[in-house]
Amino acid sequence: MNLEEYKGVYIFAQQVDNEISSIAFELLGKAKDLAKDLNTEVTAVLLGSGVKGLADQLAEYGADKVIVVDDPELKDYRTEPYAHALASVINKYKPEIMLVGATAIGRDLGPRVSARVATGLTADCTVLEIGDFPLQPVPGQEQLHNQLLMTRPAFGGNTIATIACPYNRPQMATVRPGVMQKIEPVKGAKAVVEEYNPGFTPDNKYVEILDIVKAVTETVDIMDAKILVSGGRGVGSPENFKILEDLAEVLGGTVSCSRAVVDSGWKPKDLQVGQTGKTVRPNVYFAIGISGAIQHVAGMEESDIIIAINKDADAPIFDVADYGVVGDLNKIVPKLTEALKAEIAAAK
Amino acid sequence: MKIVVCIKQVPDTKGGVKFNPDGTLDRGAMLTIMNPDDKAGLEAALRLKDQYGAEVTVVTMGLPKAEEVLREAMAMGADKGVLVTDRVLGGADTWATSTTLAGAIRNLEYDLIITGRQAIDGDTAQVGPQISEHLNIPVISYAQNIKIEGDSVIVERQYEDRYHVLKAKMPCLITALSELNEPRYMTPGGIFDAYKQEITVWGRADLKDVDDSNLGLKGSPTKIAKASDKVRKGAGEKVTLDPDESVSYIVDKLKVKHVI
């Protein structure tokens, strides 16, 4: 493998139902920073059926170039045709860096592709930067420059590790959604669009989609919410989430929850914050009746302001809360909603 | 039907985490459990065994002490256990781990391979799909329901906002979510029998069609540059007030921060 041949920062531009996923724009934002440090370009790889028209959107969010693989086999996500398409793009174009979202699609596609092109893959990264490996010079070992340094939590958020992939290319990472910042879109920006089709020959690895069942949800994506009112097991019952919903409504916020609530069947999985749920960083995060297991904290500790209400004064949530209130949520939350209603009405 | 289940002995992340000087985990120094997603995968295999009849072989890679999770799996109902252990395999990343496990599984007959979605120590979710790639068979990740129909498997595959009902021809690899089921307990008879049974132990020489350059710490493309305990931002204020005062306290903070 001649490492010098590999150039450019590439991102997998995930789309679902021909709508580009938010993670693709987040990856573009990060890719732009990395490309600047490496003095190179950002390329988005767009796979799907009838998706060419989406290239302009990727340009507006920072792609210099878009490689489009447009084929009916890529209509809905399936591991094999997508892995074949992305691996073929990597083998043909030889990117130095390949970023993929750590979504339910990317965490399946990434490992399959990295194994096919025989390179390393670092999972669920939260920080990406260009630097040296080893970080400090080590006698008898060449220190390599311009390496992708990939930082990720492990052990349920107990530790963080920084990982490099110094001797293989591309340097591949999956990136946790909600962590990287999109750029302000540049209206009318255009990218060089290149179409490529590696050819698709269905075999035993092409699974058949018998049915697609979409979850019916009327809620907004908690990762986009500016204010989250999050409830845990301490809320007591699915019915009692009403008091959280009332509070969220007054503040124009959204209700989310802990894993315990999802496991109890009180709320759907897409509202779950934490290691096995979503990473959120709203302006205000209310943790109500949430004890604050480390797996939960890993998904919300980057929030600007964390307000915790819990009757257990020793709950670990108070270790990360900016403002902690020890008390009965059933007494405090409804009154808080009323008080905020009055404040907001008075301010008008 | 023959089912291979890959399981991993993992440190219980509720306990402390310890490192070797080179940044890799000091697995010997931590309390261990069977990884929860793997246990769900094993349970799924045992249910298929109950329903359709199957031989279930559990495979693990790790230190010699990882034999414990094989015994546990056999006490739950697995038929055979294979421990892959060798000094040269240590320090492996997901590429080297999946290469090793694929090398072991090539010695076994299988219609279905089940792995957990991810282990609670690494949280990568990469090894299952990578094994399937090395073995050139289809993968279905994030399985939430598994049925057998003739020579195919029908699986509900979970995404953030939907699930796909997928049909794949066996052999096939499935990665299981811990939400898939409630794993059964070991039975006293099962425990007794499990400790009487032979466990197959394989080293480097027993792996089929693998190259030394893809094994262990040396064969891992990813290298740890740094590992450390997470530094948290620390606690802010904590107050204990009556409900009305609590409300005023929160409202004041929201005002100061210009939220309202």
Image (tube, rainbow, N blue to C red):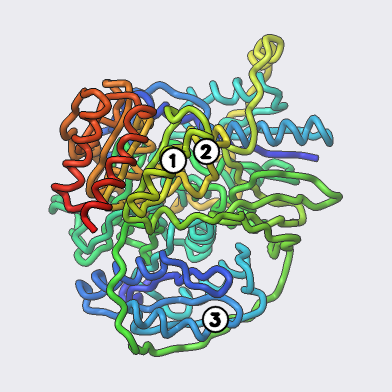
Residue appearing at x 35%, y 66% in the figure? A26
Q: Which amino acid does label 3 sit on?
A: Val
| Residue corresponding to mark 3 | A51
Count of numbered circles in the view: 3
Instruction: Specify few, some or many for label 2: CA neighbours under 10 Å numbering under 14, 14-19, or 20 or more.
Output: some
Give the spatial CA distance, label 2 vs label 1. 7 Å
Q: SS of the residue at dot 1?
A: strand
Q: Which amino acid does label 2 sit on?
A: Val
Quarter of the image where the C terminus of chain A is located: bottom left
Numbered circle sitting on residue A306: none
Residue A93 percent coordinates (x, y): 43, 80
Quarter of the image where the N terminus of chain A is located: bottom left
* Sequence order check, earlier mark of 3 and 2: 3
Numbered circle sitting on residue A262: 2
| Residue corresponding to mark 1 | A257
Q: Mark 1 lies on which chain?
A: A
* Sequence order check, earlier mark of 3 and 1: 3
Q: Can residue B25 be seen in this view?
A: yes
Mark 2 vs mark 1: same chain? yes
Give the spatial CA distance, label 3 vs label 1. 35 Å
Residue appearing at x 30%, y 31% in the figure? A309
Q: Which of marks 3 and 2 is in front?
A: 2
Instruction: Specify few, some or many for label 1: CA neighbours under 10 Å numbering under 14, 14-19, or 20 or more.
Output: many
Q: SS of the residue at dot 3?
A: loop
Residue appearing at x 39%, y 50% in the figure? A249
* Sequence order check, earlier mark of 2 and 1: 1
Question: For residue A72, which quarter of the picture?
Answer: bottom right
Q: Is residue B220 visible?
A: no
Mark 2 and mark 1 in contact? Answer it, CB < 8 Å: yes
Q: Which amino acid does label 1 sit on?
A: Cys
